[in-house]
């Protein structure tokens, strides 16, 4: 890597310890590092200035990493993304439909793996973009709860205009890819409801703290 023009990275993680240690690791390697606490924060920063690469945790409150990465892939397909998962979140495999160029499992992979992955993705940016499979990205949305009438609802963020709107879900437990239309711009949106957020992810996070 050349020190002449440092590459900009955006690290997205809700755990301050993980965020800071990952930022230190990559700053030491000469990258210019910015951080975001959650998906919405990350989107604002990406709109202000596009990073060369994004490293995002998958389990975060407000906007999950699944949702963030889906939006990034639709809006900014040129930016490579590394998805970070807690070591025990998915028992070794990541759910289908997750859009990322690489995965990093806290506690399973060594930080040097992350450095290698980042360097490789940045070197191969042009090649990655020409892969047509990158275009397809259903939005993963966290289950938000129930409304006043007890009907479960989710908040969908449009991949095109980035506006969010609530939507009732008739059946809980459906993990198929579903479709809806953005209330603001009529874009057809594909989505999957992210039930992993119902898991005790906090425990896995605590166990993984300091692992990166
Ligand atoms: Zn829209």
Image (cartoon, rainbow, N blue to C red):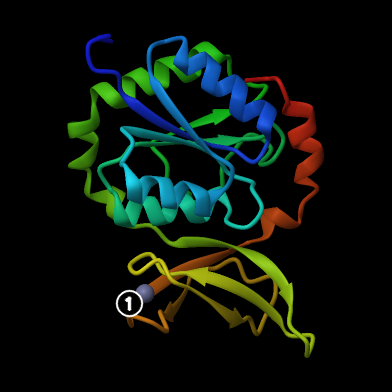
User: On the rendered image, what quadrant is the C terminus found in?
Assistant: top right
Residue drawn 47% across the image and 10% down it:
28
Q: Is mark 1 within 8 Å of ligand 1?
A: yes
Bin the neighbour count of mark 1 within 10 Å (Cα to Cα): few under 14, some 14-19, many 20 and up: some
Q: The N terminus lies in which quarter of the figure? A: top left
Query: Where on the picture, by quarter, is residue 174?
Result: bottom right
111 or 91, nearer to the observer = 111
x%, y% of residue 176? 54, 68
Residue drawn at x 43%, y 62% is 138
| Residue with the most extreme bottom position | 149
| Secondary structure of residue under mark 1 | loop
Q: Is residue 126 left or right of residue 1?
A: left
Q: Quadrant of residue 211?
A: top right
- Given the current orientation, which residue lies at the most extreme front position? 48
Residue marked by disc 1: 187
* Location of residue 43 in the rendering, given as x and y in whole percent from the top left corner: 43, 51
Residue 30 in the image: x percent, y percent? 38, 12
Q: Name the side, left or right, on which 191 lies relative to 212.
A: left
Q: Please tell me which residue is depicted at 41% across the width and 15% down the height of the picture.
A: 116
- The quarter of the displayed image where residue 34 is located: top left
Residue 194 x/y as whole percent: 62, 60
- Answer left or right for 132 relative to 179: left
Ligand 1 positioned in quadrant: bottom left
**Residue nearer the viewer, 64 or 135:** 64
Vertical arrangement, residue 109 with respect to residue 45, above or below = above
Q: Residue at x 70, y 55 (%)?
A: 197
Q: How many marks?
A: 1
């Amino acid at each position: 890597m050349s020190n002449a023009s440092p590459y900009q990275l955006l690290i997205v993680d809700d755990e301050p310890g993980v965020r800071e240690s990952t930022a230190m690791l990559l700053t030491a390697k000469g990258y210019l590092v910015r951080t975001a606490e959650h998906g919405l924060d990350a989107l604002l920063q990406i709109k202000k200035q596009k990073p060369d690469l994004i490293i995002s945790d998958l389990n975060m409150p407000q906007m999950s990493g699944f949702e963030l990465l889906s939006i990034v892939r639709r809006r900014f397909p040129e930016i490579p993304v590394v998805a970070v998962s807690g070591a025990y979140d998915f028992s070794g495999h990541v759910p289908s439909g997750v859009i990322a160029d690489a995965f990093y499992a806290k506690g399973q992979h060594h930080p040097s793996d992350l450095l290698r992955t980042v360097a490789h993705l940045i070197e191969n940016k042009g090649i990655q973009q020409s892969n047509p499979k990158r275009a397809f990205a259903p939005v993963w949305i966290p289950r938000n709860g129930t409304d006043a009438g007890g009907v479960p609802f989710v908040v969908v963020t449009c991949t095109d205009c980035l506006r969010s709107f609530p939507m009732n879900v008739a059946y809980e437990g459906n993990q198929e890819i579903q479709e809806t239309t953005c209330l603001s711009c009529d874009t057809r949106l594909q989505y999957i409801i992210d039930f992993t957020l119902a898991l005790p992810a906090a425990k896995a996070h605590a166990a993984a703290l300091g692992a990166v």
